[in-house]
Image: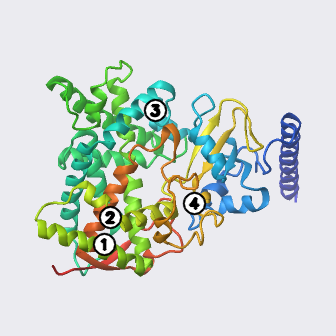
């Protein structure tokens, strides 16, 4: 009986403390900001609404967290996620303002474990002239015809090698295959490393590294974060060895990879440690973004026979021309396929590979009547904008034809972010996806396994997209 009484009193006191905390915090915010703050709730003390946000993110409807609050509070609302009071925006105009703002207004903000893993010198975290310099150097190299030609040759080589081993009586896991291809292609572009023993070792350490990106921020032996940091140290050591070899052999006038580009710059701030750290950070798209793009394109095409047929006809025509001429396709051939590009664009809209960006306000900012207080975070959510029926008719329907007459420069479409931190590899992602789809649809017919088709993909594609393939006769 005494135990029951103690538990009851403890629960009562805990509930009282929570209610007093929430009421006091609410009154404090109202008095300080005079009702300029967007509507919303900060959730539970300390943890806020983080648990619901994360659980929704890993469901088949990641946008449900946003949709639920948008219906009650409007397109911009306040919340509390990842340990910080946060203004969440599902408004395209507000998102555009956030993306276009410079480092005097907003700076990047990420969960603590991610910040520790990336390091203070990561291009994702640094600001000002150094960030602009690195972003500009890498962006210019990624846009160069020289690199596009190299990426095309490497993609063709690795795609053919991968597809040559596909068997008709065994399921092919599209995400696994595209991860291998994209990682090899990207690492070659970053550090000129070819497949082999060092590549396999790098891949092993990289898998250990990324497994801790969203871990608890506890850096103790045995924890996921500690293991990831140890893996990154081994990767940095390998990349630094490559940097040192390049310095000793003399710098290339015509850069072959990103390391060459950064080494050729005269800035003393671009140290070997900074270069090595950023090279590893740039490997993440090869494991995540690009393979997910190719996997989702396969999924959506599997569910839309009309789009698959038109895509196949377009690519078969190109293949026929190639066979007649007897020359390999170049990068501009792949990017000149109009319907293929609309398929990739629609995949980016529906798939939302980059779900949004998090920033921290350096001063009070008011956007469209919504106050973002100094020190608060703001989450510009792209997914909700891309799936808003006020921006797109039937937003959950895969419809590549909608892009034949639609402007992609609209603030309603931001699959690669925007502003000074626009993803520099956006053109290469399109190119790699175009090459993969061309070889896939011209060599194979397929049907997806039953568990591959879901109502909507999760944020990071928990399902590996198994398909059964049948090789097309030449």
Q: Are marks 1 and 3 in contact (CB under 8 Å)?
A: no
* Lower sequence index among marks 2 and 4: 2
Q: Earlier in the sequence, mark 3 or mark 2?
A: 3
Instruction: Measuring from the top left, give residue 338's x and y in whole percent.
Output: 36, 65
Picture disc at residue 148: none
Q: Are discs 2 and 1 less than 8 Å apart at CB?
A: yes
Whichever of callouts 2 and 1 sits on the residue coming sooner in the sequence is 1
Q: Residue at x 68, y 62 (%)?
A: 67
Q: Quadrant of residue 216?
A: top right
Q: Earlier in the sequence, mark 4 or mark 3?
A: 3
Spatial CA distance of label 2 from label 4 is 24 Å
Viewer-proximal residue among 356 and 278: 356
According to the picture, the residue beneath numbered tag 2 turns out to be 337
Q: Label 3 neighbourhood size at 10 Å, few (<14), some (14-19), many (20+)?
A: some
Residue placed under numbered mark 4 in the picture: 386
Left or right of residue 225, residue 473 in this image: left
Q: Secondary structure at mark 4?
A: helix
Residue nearest the viewer, comparing 100 with 56: 100
- Whichever of labels 4 and 1 marks the residue nearer the N terminus, that label is 1
């Amino acid at each position: 009986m005494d135990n029951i009484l103690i538990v009851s009193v403890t629960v009562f006191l805990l509930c009282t403390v929570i209610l007093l905390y929430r009421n006091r915090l609410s009154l404090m915010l109202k008095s300080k900001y005079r009702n300029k703050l967007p509507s919303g709730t900060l959730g539970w003390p300390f943890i806020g609404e983080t648990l619901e946000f994360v659980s929704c993110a890993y469901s088949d409807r990641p946008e449900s967290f946003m949709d639920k609050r948008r219906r009650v509070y409007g397109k911009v609302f306040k919340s509390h996620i990842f340990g910080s009071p946060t203004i969440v925006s599902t408004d395209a105009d507000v998102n555009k303002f956030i993306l276009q703002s410079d480092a005097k207004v907003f700076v990047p903000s990420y969960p603590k474990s991610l910040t520790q893993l990336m390091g203070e010198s990561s291009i994702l975290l640094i600001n000002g002239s150094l960030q602009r310099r690195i972003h500009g150097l890498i962006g210019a190299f990624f846009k160069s015809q020289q690199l596009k030609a190299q990426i095309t040759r490497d993609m063709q080589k690795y795609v053919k090698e991968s597809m040559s081993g596909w068997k008709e009586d065994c399921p092919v896991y599209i995400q696994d295959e595209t991860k291998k291809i994209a990682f090899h292609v990207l690492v070659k572009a970053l550090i000129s490393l070819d497949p082999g023993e060092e590549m396999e070792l790098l891949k092993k350490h990289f898998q250990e590294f990324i497994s801790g990106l969203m871990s608890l921020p506890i850096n103790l032996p045995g924890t996921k974060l500690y293991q990831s940091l140890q893996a990154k140290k081994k990767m940095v050591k390998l990349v630094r060895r490559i940097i040192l070899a390049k310095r000793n052999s003399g710098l290339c006038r015509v850069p072959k990879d990103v390391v060459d580009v950064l080494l050729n710059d005269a800035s003393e701030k671009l140290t070997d440690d900074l270069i090595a750290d950023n090279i590893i950070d740039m490997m993440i798209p090869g494991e995540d973004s690009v393979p997910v793009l190719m996997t989702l394109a396969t999924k959506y095409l599997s569910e839309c026979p009309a789009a698959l047929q038109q895509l196949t006809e377009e690519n078969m025509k190109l293949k026929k021309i190639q066979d007649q001429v007897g020359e390999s396709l170049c990068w501009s051939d792949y990017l000149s396929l109009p319907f293929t590009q609309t398929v990739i664009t629609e995949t980016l809209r529906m798939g939302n590979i980059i779900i949004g960006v998090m920033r921290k306000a350096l001063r009070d900012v008011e956007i469209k009547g919504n106050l973002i207080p100094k020190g608060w975070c703001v989450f510009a959510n792209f997914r909700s904008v891309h799936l808003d029926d006020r921006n797109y008719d039937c937003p959950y329907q895969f419809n590549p034809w909608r892009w034949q007459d639609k402007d992609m420069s609209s603030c309603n479409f931001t699959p690669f972010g925007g502003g000074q931190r626009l993803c520099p590899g956006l053109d290469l992602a399109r190119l790699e996806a175009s090459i993969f789809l061309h070889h896939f649809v011209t060599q194979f017919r397929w049907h997806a396994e039953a568990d591959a088709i879901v109502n909507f993909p999760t944020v990071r594609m928990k399902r590996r997209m198994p398909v059964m393939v049948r090789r097309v006769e030449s």
